[in-house]
Each structure stands twice: as structure tokens, then as C-alpha cells.
Image (cartoon, helix red, strand yellow):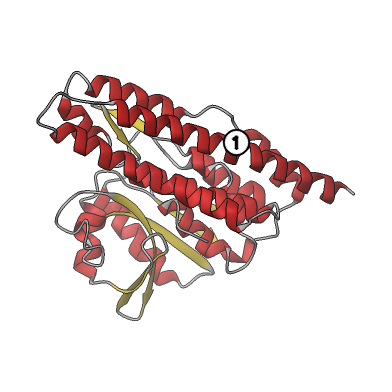
Amino acid sequence: MKSSHCFLDAITSVVGEYQDPRPMLLGVWEADFVIKEQKITYFSDAINHDEYLERLNRLYGECAEHWYDYEQSKPNNLEILQELLHSKQDEEYLVQVDLFYLPYEIRSYQKKHMPHFIRLVKEEERFLVTDPFLDFCGEVDEKDLEDAFLLNELGGGIKLKTSNLKAPSEDEISKIFNSVFRTDNRLVTESLRVVKEGAKDRTILREGFLEIGILGKRKLSYLAAFSLFNRRTPEIENAIIMLSKGWTHLGFLAIKASMAKMKLDIDPLLQKLHQLEQSEHEIKMNLKQSYEEWMNHVSV
């Protein structure tokens, strides 16, 4: 599966070793975001992953819970993590870190702070990181990991008991799809608002869409949904990939507009947003039809 969401990519990389992970990605194309100081951002202390943790337990049995204790300090949570890594139980551990301190991610290392989830194990004295979102698997220095954990703006961690994982039921998959499927497009709505504010202040355009590519990458979760409902075709796959890339292109257009020496022209941004809205609406309608056909098949 293509990477779409760092937390869920870590989750599904574990689940996928035992069961079908695709139901976990339903609705990730609508994953939450906030507007912080006129900037669209994917991370905030107002966003948590409890919804996905609940879904994980609904689909695969009671297999996951927080190990991170938000009532404790980060150093105390580091001690908790170290004890877990030494326990050698049938559990997998997810850890939230800041990519600013991890050398394997050269685009962020010592450049920008980005909260991020990884899988972490300890083998003898080596710390091994699996990062499906960034396609990395390898050893990371203990000091770098400690800095990435302790100096992270936020904090979090999940443990999965792999021996408890069971196959998801079609009924539960159906309930989840119906609960997450929506025809409106909040990302377009909020982006339009930021563009209109940016027409009054160029700095808003320059800063407002810096993380839009990460949110655009979440649109790739449509691929897992179409695959789950047996309707992933080359045409559909191309439309989804182009949708994801289109959000990154919007970010480039915003930066370009903010740097223009002449009169600010937001028309290209408005046209791009209209195109993205239309493209995603077509994908959603196609997905709804795919789901209905899948339901008719499994109900026979």
C-alpha cells in the first residue's frame, strides 16, 4: 500500500503481518487537520488518534492501547518505553518522535520540527526503527532517538498485542465505511478561506499551505478502499495519484503567488481548488458505487 498517514502506516504495517489492514484506512482521505495562525496543519495537541485506536479494536479485537501516559513527564515516559522494549512480549510499540532529530529523514533533519510515528524495537543493544511512511527500516542511534522523543512538541505511543489480532468482519467494515463517508470537502472549504485571507496578506499564502502536501498524501488512502471493494483499476489509481499530487501543486502555486512582484492574482489558486473538488467528488461517487456493489456481493 502507498503511504498516506504516518500513524496509520505504522499501524497497518503491523496489522498487515497478520490480517488485512485495508479497513483501517477507510476515511483517512478526510483525516483531521486544524487551522493554526492561518496555517493549515496536520498536527496539534487538539488532534489525537483515539478514533483510530477505537477502530483498530473494533475491527481486529481488543489488541491496542496507549502505553504513553500523558499525566507523566516525557523522561518518565521514556523510562516506561525502555521497560517495554526490554520486556520481549508479543507486542509491537509505536512511538511519536520529532523528525528534526532523526538523521534518516534528510528533508526535516535539523531543519523543521515534524511530529511523526515510528515502530521501534530493541535487539540486544541496537534500536531498530521501521518507518513505513518514509520507507525506512534500520538502526538509529540511541541518543538521536532520545532527543526525538524527549524534545518532541507533543507525545504519544501505542502498543499492539499481536496475538490478539483477528480477521475483521464484513459487517464491521460496512459500519465504519458508512460512518466515515461524506460528500462535502472540508479541506477545500478551509483552503478557500485561507486563499481569500491570503489575498489581503501575502504572508498567509506563503505560510498557509506549507503542510498541504502531507494532507494531500492522505488522499492516497482511497487506493486501499478501492482495493478492499475490488474495484482498483489503472484509471482509478491514476485519478487518485493525480489528486494527491494536485494538493502539492496547490502549495507551489500559493508560494509562487506570494512571491509575485506584480499585483497578487489568486485566480490560479481558485481554479486549482475547483479542479481538486471536482476530481475528489468523482472519486467519492465511484467509491460509493464500488462499496454498494461489494455489499451486494457479500450479502448474497
Q: Would you place residue 294 above or below residue 123 in this image?
A: above
Is residue 190 shown left or right of residue 287? left
| Residue at the outermost front position | 262
| Residue at the outermost left position | 261
Q: Quadrant of residue 268?
A: top left
The x, y position of residue 246, in whole percent, is: 39, 44
The x, y position of residue 93, in whole percent, is: 44, 61
The x, y position of residue 281, in whole percent, is: 56, 34
Q: Would you place residue 240 above or below residue 107 in this image?
A: above
Is residue 287 shown left or right of residue 11? right
Q: Nearer the viewer, residue 91 or 210?
A: 210
Is residue 38 shown left or right of residue 69? left
The residue under the point 58% across, 41% down is 283
Q: Quadrant of residue 135?
A: bottom left
**Residue indicated by mark 1:** 180
Is residue 133 shown left or right of residue 146? right
The residue under the point 43% across, 51% down is 5
- Mark 1 residue type: Val
Dot 1 falls on a residue whose secondary structure is helix
Q: Would you place residue 273 above or below residue 121 in this image?
A: above
The residue under the point 17% across, 22% down is 201
